[in-house]
Amino acid sequence: MGNLISISGRSTLIGTEPPATVRAPEIEPGVGCNFDSYLLVPDNTLHDRIAAAKARLGEDVVILGHHYQRDEVIQFADFRGDSLKLSFQAAEAYSRYIVFCGVHFMAESADILRRPHQVVVLPDLNAGCSMADMADIGQVEACWRELASVVDVSKIVPVTYMNSTAAIKAFTGQQGGSICTSSNAAAVLKWAFENGEKVLFLPDEHLGRNTGYRMGIPLGEMIVWDPYQEFGGNTPEAVRKARIILWKGYCSVHQRFTPEQVARVRREHPGIRVIVHPECRFEVAQAADQIGSTEGIIKAIESAPASSEWAVGTEIHLVNRLGKAFHDRKVISLDRNVCVCTTMFRITPQHLLWALENLGSGNVVNRISVDERTRYCARLALDRMLSLR
Ligand code: SF4
């Protein structure tokens, strides 16, 4: 089902006056209209309308909010978490509609893990992920063919970060590989090396390098595959020697952090602890005191003593929320400038309202649907990861 919904009979609500003898339909302005009409909903009514639309749907809907989501949206989430945790919570919740306030690959993952009766909705289809978009399935398949021309690919295990498209997850499943998250990347890499000689790590170069290095793999044994260069920018000899082939992809939020920022924050706040996400560059991860996944960062600050000071290298909405939740600790961003996930930020209260009110009227808008074959193969890769828990 697409995002187009019938607007017939509704135009009187946003423009022309209805004829005197005809009563206007008794529905809220905007319901049943395309999204643009929701841009006219007054800001001061949004909260109450979203709450009412959610209440009307009752147990039919579960709203998921990723930690990087803006406050005005995440306040309506039934569950908050990272993408994997949220997908499982949704399936466990059993609700008919899963409204995912995150980005496209997260909604795809929820669709892969959902129960048969569930439908996944992404309030704004433009909420993508720059990192996931950096590994196109055609490029990855071409890379695999090129690797096969110089090494035995049956000995290469693909390991794919959760932040990837369903097509890349399916490729991973087909080739005997596994998905990983930022929390379990080391455990999945260990499994991969027990089952093969080399790893193709997709699509985040930094998570792959940071994890491999912490496991004792020298930097010289990790090469980068740039899909825009001939043979990935490598020689056949370099591919033969490499243990990890890192796909050249990155997160536009975490790549912004620099070692200079770490040095500055230490100068300005002596004694502060620096914790960064493993999607940050190698030099930043090396300069930090601690590396933590999204959930790892939350746990570290939660369990820290009162009056401790933290500089955090991750998305700003999470950093600000941690600062508010633990006001007896100092929590600041490593980057003085706002470091926001602009794609996730695309989901506004207006989008959430539009999705909920349409669901309430029986219109499924912005459904995310992964085809059966892709779901099946992607599920293989996800199940491999889950079997390692
Ligand atoms: S923070 Fe980075 S990896 Fe996460 S959704 Fe945004 S762009 Fe993608």
Image: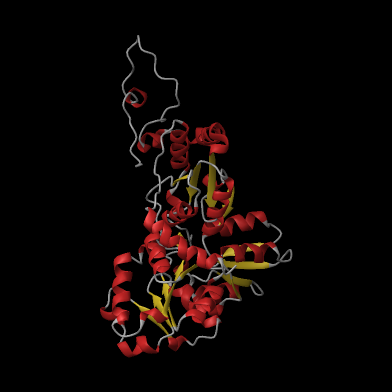
- Residue located farthest toward the left when viewing the structure as drawn: 230
Q: Is residue 273 above or below residue 35?
A: below
- The image quarter containing residue 354 is top left
Q: Position of residue 344 (x, y in %)?
A: 45, 53
Is 12 placed left or right of 355 in the picture?
Answer: left
- Residue located farthest toward the top when viewing the structure as drawn: 21
- The image quarter containing residue 377 is bottom left
- Residue located farthest toward the right when viewing the structure as drawn: 306
- The tally of labels here is 0
- In front of the other: 253 or 175: 175
Q: How is the image coloured?
A: secondary structure
User: Which residue corresponds to the image point at 41% horizontal and 86% vertical from the top-left?
Assistant: 242
Q: Is residue 335 visible?
A: no
Which image quarter is the C terminus in? Answer: bottom right
- The image quarter containing residue 324 is bottom right
User: Which residue corresponds to the image point at 57% horizontal and 76% vertical from the top-left?
Assistant: 288
- In front of the other: 92 or 346: 92
Q: Position of residue 100 (x, y in %)?
A: 48, 48
User: Which residue corresponds to the image point at 29% horizontal and 79% vertical from the top-left?
Assistant: 146
- In front of the other: 3 or 373: 373
Is 4 placed left or right of 112 in the picture?
Answer: left
Looking at the image, in which quadrant does ligand 1 appear?
Answer: bottom left
Q: Is residue 199 above or below residue 31?
A: below
Q: Position of residue 256 (x, y in %)?
A: 45, 68
Q: Position of residue 235 (x, y in %)?
A: 30, 87
Q: Is residue 19 above or below residue 226?
A: above
- In front of the other: 182 or 292: 182
Which image quarter is the N terminus in? Answer: top left
User: Which residue corresponds to the image point at 57% horizontal and 37% vertical from the top-left?
Assistant: 59
Q: Is residue 67 visible?
A: yes
